[in-house]
Amino acid sequence: MKEWFKELYQNCFGNDIPMRIRFLHLCTLGGTLGALLATISPLISGVYSMPGIIVCLITVVFFFGLFVMTQTTGNYDAVIIIGVCGLNFIIYPLLYFTMGGIQGGMVLYFIMGIVFSLLLLNLKQSMVIFPLEILCYIAIFILGDKYPELFVNVLKLKHNYTLDTALDFAVVSLTTFCVIKILYNAYEKQQARAEALVHELEDLSITDPLTKVRNRRFLMQAVESEIKKTKRDSHAVAVIMFDIDKFKSVNDTYGHLIGDEVLKNFANIISTHCREYDIVARYGGEEFVILLPQTTESVAFNRAEEIRRAVEASELCSSQHVPITASGGVAIYNPVTMHSVEDFIGKADTYLYEAKETGRNQIIWQHNAKGLAK
């Protein structure tokens, strides 16, 4: 039974259910409960007529029937139209003439019916039905005033008018409060879910789908931001560019699935050797770049050497013995010679090129570079 209620709740109020449909479920269930309370309160106050009690019971069945329709047919638009029209044009008028009219507190229910109608209907439907509701209620007031014989005799209405009105007010207020409170909580949850989805989409847009490190677009923006900070605060910033040695032969020999595993493990090794605020990004193919804020060139070189040695000592493929090494180039930002992000990263790329041309599996920086032209 617990699982059944849990499943019912998810089907009616789960995060994947559109807000309008959740509100429909809330109105049908809340209407069932509210109609039941509206049936009980006249019996407590003693202000009722038997035809009025019968209409109240019909209202309970009506709302519960709407809820069953939402679960069995899934035709929510039809349920909304039936509910709004049946409630405002049939049930409420009947209750007005069988439960004492204005003195019986029915105006409170009219207002609740109009509010819920506006929340459930779309704009075009509201433009048609809302004026009809207003005309219907005005006509009811006029008919009740001109033809008092239309009212069913309500027991003790004059004697218990205050108690009856107070109970009607309590029922309407409680029902409206519960519906609006639950609706607001559902709205907050949906907003939180929407924000989480937006955040997830933003994260996906800046993340390499294979290796789960940042992508080139994010890297370029981050480097540009760090350059601005460096110019303002005179802090050093370095980049390391890595390339897997002879990666094409790995793909050609073992296949692209093995190549993908090597790339993922390579990215993981780099990430584990970086600080929390360093940025690791896949620059393209088998090339990776690390942005190291507030880092001197010698520190960056030592970091690059640690990563190179870790790659050399690691098995980057669990199913095949694939010996892998990596080459790297280290550059420090120089505002005099580097006028753009491309100049900065291009310097590290130049050193990387030299590392690959002079034997691979090594890190080149300005203190050991031979100045090979690329």
Image: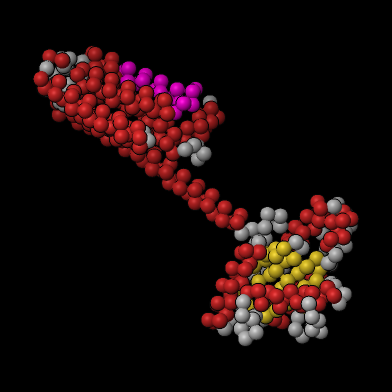
Q: Quadrant of residue 322?
A: bottom right
Residue toward you, 182 or 358: 358
Q: Quadrant of residue 301?
A: bottom right
Q: Quadrant of residue 156?
A: top left
* Residue drawn at (43%, 46%) of the image: 188
* Residue drawn at (15%, 29%) of the image: 162
Is residue 286 toward the left or the right of residue 92 in the image? right
Is residue 174 shown above or below 255? above
Is residue 261 shown above or below 305? above
Q: Position of residue 286 (x, y in %)?
A: 77, 63
* Residue drawn at (81%, 68%) of the image: 326
Can residue 345 be seen in this snapshot? yes
Residue toward you, 1 or 78: 78
Is residue 10 toward the left or the right of residue 311 in the image? left
Residue 16 is inside the magenta segment = no
Q: Position of residue 233 (x, y in %)?
A: 54, 82
Is residue 354 toward the left or the right of residue 138 in the image? right
Q: Position of residue 72 (x, y in %)?
A: 49, 22
Can residue 311 be seen in this snapshot? no
* Residue drawn at (15%, 20%) of the image: 143
Range drawn in magenta: 57-76
Is residue 9 shown above or below 314? above
